[in-house]
Image (cartoon, grey):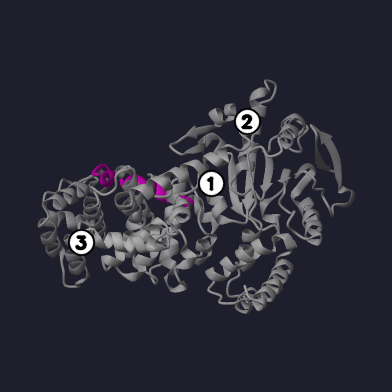
Amino acid sequence: MVPFRDRLESELGRVGDLPTLPAVVTSLERALSDQSSDASDVARIISQDPSLAANILRVANSAFYAGAAGTITSIAGAVARLGFSETRSLCVTIAVVRSFGHIGQHMDHRQFWKHSIVAAVATRVIAGFCNMAGAFSQDDAYVAGLLHDIGALVLDQYFPDDFQDIRAMADEHCVPYAVAEYEVLQVDHGEIGGYLLRRWNLPESIVRAVSYHHQPFRAGIDHRPLVQTVHLADAMCTSLGIGDGADGVPAGFSNGAWYDLDLSVEHLPDLLELITREAGRCSTLVSMI
Amino acid sequence: MTATQTLEFQALRDYVGKHCGLVINDAEAGDTDTRISQLMLEYDCADGASFYQLIRGNTRPEIRDRIIEVLTARETCWFRDAHPFVILKEKILPALAGPAHHNASSPIRIWSAGCSTGQEPYSIAIAMDEFYRSRTDTEPGRFEIIGTDISPSAIMLALAGRYDGVAMAQGLSEEIRREYFTEGSRTWEIKPEVRSRVSFRKHNLRDSTAEMGLFDIIFMRHVVRDYTREFREDFHSRLMGALHPSGYLILGTGESPEGCGGEMEVLSYADGEYYRRSN
């Protein structure tokens, strides 16, 4: 039998409509990494994509961001209110969710993206909590968290028979999906997602974080901080029952993450509460899905 | 595995066991080697010698906890062995819940040591709730349950209090499941009123118990069985320091409080034994 890794390469290599990273994200990345860019440059790029622009306005005017301030009608105003970093995160989220809107036949998309979005925010929260600024950026943390389960959608769309077998096995034996994936395919959805992200030319640190978020010890020690942060964020969201990602039942995390990130158990209740609160904050974004 | 690697692992196993106070039987050698290999990979150690250096050095002070945690992963279930919870409800609580308690105004304090993912402390909380509900002559009492484990991941799962079908299938009656859990899509969540009764913290059995204060009841079941006799004796004698005079100790089936001398009185009830500290 052909190993799944080979099937993955050959079958996805043949697929013409494999989702690509939306062009608007690439343009924004370029603009935001340019020190001379200002809010009007970023607004111009967003305005070229009317649907994205409308959604950015809607988020900027949501209760969380608007507070008592008035309604904003211009994209430049929205960018100024949200800040560059938040604008980037929101644009990536909206564009990626849109690109993958038609992908996957069996997944509950709303639950899937709810888990992914909250995991993205949780990855950023944990990174901040653990002072990871020297190891990776908050923006990379968000993108890695957002895309960590993307491989499950690829599996659902392009390998539906395998996907069904895996779900049936996980349900029957009550094991996390990643464990069943390894049983059936000898890879998990992390590695499948990593394959896609590598085609998108995303930074290696993000590719590794996604690839090994269920097996952080395989990531290589240099990449460990971001991998462990995503791993922990994912485990916390699954344990709290936030959305239904690609994991299913609560499975805990590798204790290595704990020590690599220098956390203390006394922090756990605060961290879980912080993530629960951030999950509430994502409600406008989730409601758009 | 080459002959050299086999010898290397044997030496490593012996050293790890001695370093952490663990007994590793020959029958468990293969499994132990697999778990140690995983840790070596995690710590980027290419061979046994570099892992040995890591353990001996002080660059990763958590290494001893990590070894204990991977080598002592235990099975857990709800209301394990049943009789400890009958003893709790029918013998210990009636004795402690009344005015005879050492200080009737302070809460009854219970320590569930090696609590893994929380099934034991939550079982205790449920048993205590059932006890107070069944007593019309006793005011709902204040109590405090502390669950400890060496694994941060286990503690996170315990704190979250959500369990899958396999975990729920072990030891729970339909009535308790209905009364104390909320069913989700693939999981069951312990109700907040039970969860709020229990707090969790990380604790290595080798460390001092002083900062946790004194307890009225200690559940220490099937936790020290992987350790050497020397460690078990030392640990049980230190446990006395964490127990109130007349406090109760509940051990696993087949376990005894080695190292406590005559300080513990053996009591029997409901086909099980439990211990009370002699004044």
**Quadrant holding the N terminus of chain A:** bottom left
Tell me where the magenta segment starts and ends, as one range. A270-289
Q: Is residue B183 left or right of residue A14?
A: right
Say the numbered circle drawn on residue B159.
1
Q: CA distance from mark 2 to mark 3?
A: 55 Å
Going by the numbered disc 1, the residue's amino acid type is Leu
Which x, y percent locates residue B263? 86, 48
Which is in the foreground here, disc 2 or disc 3?
3
Which x, y percent locates residue A112? 34, 47
Which chain hosts label 1? B
Which chain hosts label 2? B
Q: Residue farthest to the top?
A: B136
Nearer to the camera, A10 or B251: A10
Instruction: Using the rendered image of the protein, determine whether residue B132 is visible from the camera's viewpoint.
Output: yes
Going by the numbered disc 2, the residue's amino acid type is Asp
**Quadrant holding the C terminus of chain A:** top left
